[in-house]
Image: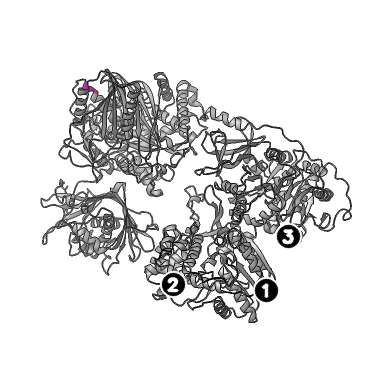
Amino acid sequence: MGPAAESASLLGARLPSSPLARAQFSPPLDPSAHPCLGDFVVGGRPVVSAGVFVESLIEAVTELGGSGPVSLQDLELPVDLALAPAGAERAAQLVVNGDQFGYYAQDPAGGWQLHAQALARSGATAAPTVALAAGGSGRELTGDELYRLLWQRALYLGSAARWVERIRLGRNEATAEIRSAVPGETEAYVIHPGLVDAMFQTALACFPADGPALVPAGLERFVHYDRGGPQDGLRCHAELFEGGTRARIRLVSANGRLVAEADGVRFVPALTRSAAEAETAQAPAAHQGPEAVRAPAPALAAPPRVVAPAGTTTTAPAEAVEAAPAVEPDAARAFVTRTVARALGTTAARLDARQSLQALGLDSLIAMKIRTTLNKEFGVLLPMAAFLEGRNTEDIADDILAALGSGTGSHEDTETEAPRADGEAVVVEDDSERYEPFGLTDLQQAYLVGRGDAFELGNTSTYFQIEIDLENVDLDRLGASFRAMIERHDMLRAVFTAEGEQRIQRDVPAYVIRETDASALEPAEREAELVAVHEEMRHQVFDTARWPLFDVRVTRIDERVIRLHAGFDALIIDGFSTSILFKEWAAHYRGETLPELRLRYRDYVREARALEAGPEYDRALAYWRDRLDTLPPAPQLPLAVSPSSLERPVFNHRGATLAREDWDRFKQHAAAAGVSPSAALCTAYAQVIAEWSATPDFSLNLLYFNRLPLHPQVGDVIGQFSTTLMLEIRDSATDSFAARASDVQSRLWSDMEHSQVSGVQVLRELNRARGASVRAAAPVVFTSLVNMAGQQDGERGGVVQYLAGIGENGRQVSSSVRTPQVWLDHQAVEEAGELLLNWDVIEELFPAGCIDAMFAAYQRTLRDLSRDAAAWQRPRPALAPVADLDVRAEANATDGPVPDGLLHDAVLARAAETPDAPAVITGSLTLTYADIERRSHQVGHRLRALGAGPGDLVGIVMDKGWEQVVAALGILRAGAAYVPIDARVPAERLHVLLDSAGISRVVTQPWVDDIADWPQGVARTVVRADEEAGGQDDAANGEPGGRLEPLGPSGAKPTDLAYVIFTSGSTGLPKGVMIEHGAALNTVVDVNERYRVTAADRALGLSAMHFDLSVYDVFGLLSAGGALVLPEPSAHREPARWAELVTEHGVTIWNSVPALMEMFTEHALANRLTGLPLRLVMMSGDWIPVNLPGRIRLLIEDAELWSLGGATEASIWSILHPIGEVNEDCVSIPYGKAMRNQRFHVLDDAMRPCPVWVPGDLYIAGVGLARGYLNDEAKTSAAFLHHPVSGERLYRTGDLGRFLPDGTIEFLGRQDSQVKIQGYRIELGEVEAALTQCEGVRAAAVVAAGEQHGPKRLIAYVVLDDGRDDTEQRITESLRKVVPQHLVPQRILVLDELPLSDNGKVNRAALPAPDEVAVEGAGFVAPRDEVERRLAEIWAEFFGVTEIGVTASFFDLGGDSLLAVRLMARIARGLGRSLPLSSLFARPTIELLAQAVRQAGSVEDGRRALVPVRTTGCRTPLVFVHPVGGDVLCYAELAELLGHDQPFYALQLPDTELPSVEDMAAHYVAAVREALPDGPYRVGGWSMGGVIALEMATQLTAAGAEVELLAVVDLMERPGPAEGAPVSDEVLLSWFARDLAGLAGVRWELPAEAFDGRPPVEVLHAEARAAGALSEDIDLDTLSSIVGRFQSNYRALLRYAPSPFAGRVLSLRAADGGASVETASRWMEYFPGDAALVDVPGDHYTVMRGERLRVLADELRQALDAH
């Protein structure tokens, strides 16, 4: 840094080097050079602001390490630095010692005072882009108003400290807009101190306005990123956390880049801070140079002291080794022995120093205590591993001596320094501030914050309750002894302040133990009284600000017996402290004298916190941060309800005891395995949790008592010493228990070696890394109190036994623990030689019986491990209860007769029995059984002639039709197996399928034969309607109509293949599933017999032939003698046509995917169809919406409804479930139970049965299994396997499911990349592979988007090759050339890169939602000026995303006409600029719309009629006219669906007054002919738009122009003119209300009578908002304008008398609640030429949205293509 820079910076000159510091600087405290120094005044006293300290530290890091990001950790600002009076100077120095930075100033007495210190480093990560939330819905303040409020609270800020321009306040959050810097203001700084202070000011605004002025006192982390250009447009967002005790603040640039962020900011009242009262430190001597300066302050952290063996850390200065006195080895060994003995609860004389520590009962907590004591004594930090693997006390002593370089010999001739006396105090006993507030531990903070209602499972406190029956107790003495405990232990007098601190009360009222006398009551009444006391105490939550935070009561049961009830808030006491309390209470009761207690909990907390500033803490923090990405989440236990739904959780208790002899053997086995009893218990508990968890990898929340040996009396103090640890469990079921316990112990001890960072802090880090959450992150807890009594005083009594010493015959009645954000809390307590097992659990979270089964399994596990040493060497056993396994065995007892024969035999038998009965019914012909027998016979002959027979595959390449039935039968009669292939697959895929299956013979239809691109050498047999089957070159093997010789036996057997159906494959190649005759026949016969299918039944064949539901359509119905009704190919998605066929042909059986049944049901209900003949509805292949069965029953009340499921690999179906009444809270329809001769299993990764409610892999077994995959042994071996125990052949479905208690299976979805959409099995990998084959696509990922139990849609994400700019449409068109339609994603979104997980795989969870891609994907451009920024804020709010780029399209984001109205209203209100809705067509992005805003006046500019939506494309343009509202955004989605080669124009109502339909049409004709002068014309419109289009067509025709097509959509009003009196405003407004409700999708009507004399539009506005039909964004003026157009247009419509149009007309009627059939027919009279009336699904409004609009667009596209 040059001289100029030095004088201009806050850092000042760098001083000559000092041996005590890495660097020293002399900051100038000169307000004239730095106005920011003088512009921060507290209580009339100018002080240095926090921003100055932060900037100074950042400047120092930048000076030493170069420019770039800088991070500060654990910044503390202990004392204010007041500036010297004018004319005086005050020296300051900034000292750098390693990563420690300290800012000192000299006081008037010459001493040096520390004012700021932090760990500071350069090289933070690059600045991320973030999206700030909209700062809340509260009030908004200007900067002046904010600073006036601060001034009123004695905090004055000058201009250099005022940067907030405007601030919006929310609940516990605020967002500030930051002013721009004036020239020359910021150049001298890395980040101007005023900007940093503005960050803190934003957080201050979140606090109550009537509170004191606050200033920052410290923070956990501050990061400043590169300046990177001008700092205009900055915004700052602050949030309060942990009950308002901490703040998180982010300063963000205009383009969304982080400038700076601060976490864990703490504030204190400004006027209570001292400026010079703190202790001063003598400055050490500094380097005496020419301009010597006194060096400040002692070193901030001591560097390592000696070089130790590997894994050992020492903490003394290296340079001091030679000068330090040597440690006498014998004394060191004696100290080690005493330390180990004391920790183990014994004496040095009784300790065998050569015995394995683990055999002596060492566990991780004891090891931690020994390790810490030795570190404090010798400065040697041993690794936790030093206590493992059979090591003993002598080994530990050797490690210490080796680290100190003292060897193993004695040093009699050397001057030595003996170790300190055992337990010499580290904590300074200081009672001067005993009653002042002090900070909380991490766990106390978590307990305090968690008891609020802001977090899941809050609204309760952490609470311990115990009840003990005692005899012969003196109650007066009992109360006096307890009052002595209150006086003795500070924390029994503790309360908690509103500022989030704790305080010891000097004096409290004499505590009286409340007594209830129940001795005179009857036994039942007495028990009720005891229960009442128990329940009252169990549910109480103390007010933490009021003493006492405990409740002790006594109930007298009889003359001898009392029940002692005690409940304690865990804020003041932990389990170990409870033991101390009970022990001392009993001792005092007995008259014993207790030793003086010198140590205070306050002093311990202060000292423990101070340890966090050392290098051990930094290492621990780095350790945990490195593990954040791999630390698994909490166990995924089965839940009955969402935890967030419980307002106040209630805990239930379960307890059991492991007897002394069992517990002793358990400990012996553990020692033999080399693990501690606690580690073994934790492993057993984790084993049970893993059995009931959806995944075997999870994190347990370990609670342990962490009393650091900082004082000899640390084991005698009551307080909350506990801490937590996030223990990672990776439960490998195949490893032995001993091996798993060893792994758990190793992980536990490694974690405890880094326990300076608590589990609470780890969870905070996780929340920072993964996003803050109010959910319970670590809800399953394990606590081991094993060795607790021994650790205390060598006694083996236990908690209860201490209390039992008060009287006689003490007996514990109950105990329980509750904790916020915890589901299940297990405590293992050693009590009087036994092991008590306590489970406290929120019972209502879990399914009935689940916790009972888990607890029983845990007890069994411990008993087995206690009584059987071999159990430690066995893999994890199956823990599912035997009773549950018996239930599912009964459900799988499905054995029945296995049918013999071939799949088609019964069809031929029916043909022989009833040759004239109808078999296949189509719209053009009906085939009898004789017909299909004869025609299939011809096909069979042809194929036999071509050499087909058993084992051969013959393709069926056809469109949907009767020919497919004939082809399948003919192929089977030839002895071959059929392979159905969609005739419309791309040529490339057709070639792949035929080649991969080795197919050289196909059966096809004439038109398919003509257009298909056949591979060379494929022989085709063509099935024709008017002649016999023939090849591509001849009609048949004989004369047409001539009789052929009988085929004779084919030679096929039940074990031969019947068909091969291709399903999607993950590598991009489809998999051919090979099904044998016997397998398929088993399913067909089961269904026919189960559902009593007869010749009287008919089924509607909706499924494609290459979808295996068609197997039952063909062979199920025909083998029973029934008939198959086939819709026309064009009606495959037409529910209106289906309804006609069902009624006309008496269809009794429905077999389809749920989505088709849903379409049919909605159509039938909307059209009030009754008397439908359906008796059986079978739905399969996809999720069944839970509300669908109820809708079906409204239509066909008596029909049987069944859910079926399975896999193509298991012959159509393998499982079924009768659907009864579906409860409202049901989330899915059960999968059911296995069908005849088939079985279902739910297994874990080790192929063991999962317990009830626990998800696992679904496996199918039985006679229905496929042979395997065609020509793919590898995939066959992977999917079809044998159970390792039973040997049963299984098919791994790739689905997840779970058993319910009654043996029913619940389906939970896919676990791999295969999904089901509309019944099609789709491998996402196949779609991805096809995408990467498209030119320009470098990488692709595909997901199935949608609700868990709802329909899914394919969404693809692609990354393009460098230099490519392919659009979604271009990629879609390329993909359609290589895959069938069902594999084409609904959206293909272009990203810069695919997000990757740590293992390099695509992180599908991180893929943006489709609506986010436009704002976060490739080409994101942030707002660049105020107009774009304001527009972006409005758009972000409307579309529910955090931030939107200016190039994002309104329509790509999902915008529609209703949203457009709201958007424009908000723009008009927020920006004072009114724009026509059509602006969004011409300017659909923020960038373009901002141009319109800048150009517009304050009133709407002239609104022209013609709106070009798409002007490109090679087709004849299509022009659509507005509906009655006058706007045309409703056509945006339609224009998109018609394709990019279809030019599309829309006509909106212009500003010109057009009172009649004729006037509108004339105006629009002129506008169209001006833009499109040459014609021909295609016009249309929805609703009134269709009527206007009709008038346009007649005017164009009269003018001699050609009109190729008139397309009208759902003409609701009958042809006019309307009869009767003119319609009133009120009636018109009620109609308008109907339209509003329809567009908003709400059920609401506003009758004309509702208008009560107030202005009608005001009534409409108020009522529509209340009903949810009108957004709050639409103000009265906007609505009035819309209503005015509506009324004028509707009256014009009612007056209009149409004229006929003789050209080509397509009339589309919304069949599910749109125009009536009568109205549509009346309009058809005006279309005397080539006119077609087509019904499409939907009502008048939904017909123009979503999937229903796709159907409409398909019909319209066909009409456009036909000309």
Image position, residue 656 (x, y; %): 41, 25
In-front residue for pair 790/1192: 1192
Q: Is residue 1062 left or right of residue 1258?
A: right
Which label sits in the foreground, 3 or 2?
Answer: 2
- Which residue has dot 3 on it? 1013
Q: Is residue 716 left or right of residue 1287?
A: left
In-front residue for pair 293/1019: 1019
Of marks 1 and 2, which one's residue comes earlier in the chain? 2
Mark 2 Cα-neighbour bin, 10 Å: few <14, some 14–19, many ≥20: many
Using the image, tell me which numbered label, if any, was put on residue 1056: none
Using the image, tell me which numbered label, if any, was put on residue 1703: 1
Is residue 96 shown to the viewer in this render? no
Of marks 3 and 1, which one's residue comes earlier in the chain? 3
Magenta-drawn stretch contains 590: yes
Q: Which residues are magenta?
A: 586-591
Is residue 1049 shown to the viewer in this render? yes
Using the image, tell me which numbered label, if any, was put on residue 1475: 2
Q: Which quarter shows the N terminus?
A: bottom left
Image position, residue 1110 (x, y; %): 69, 48
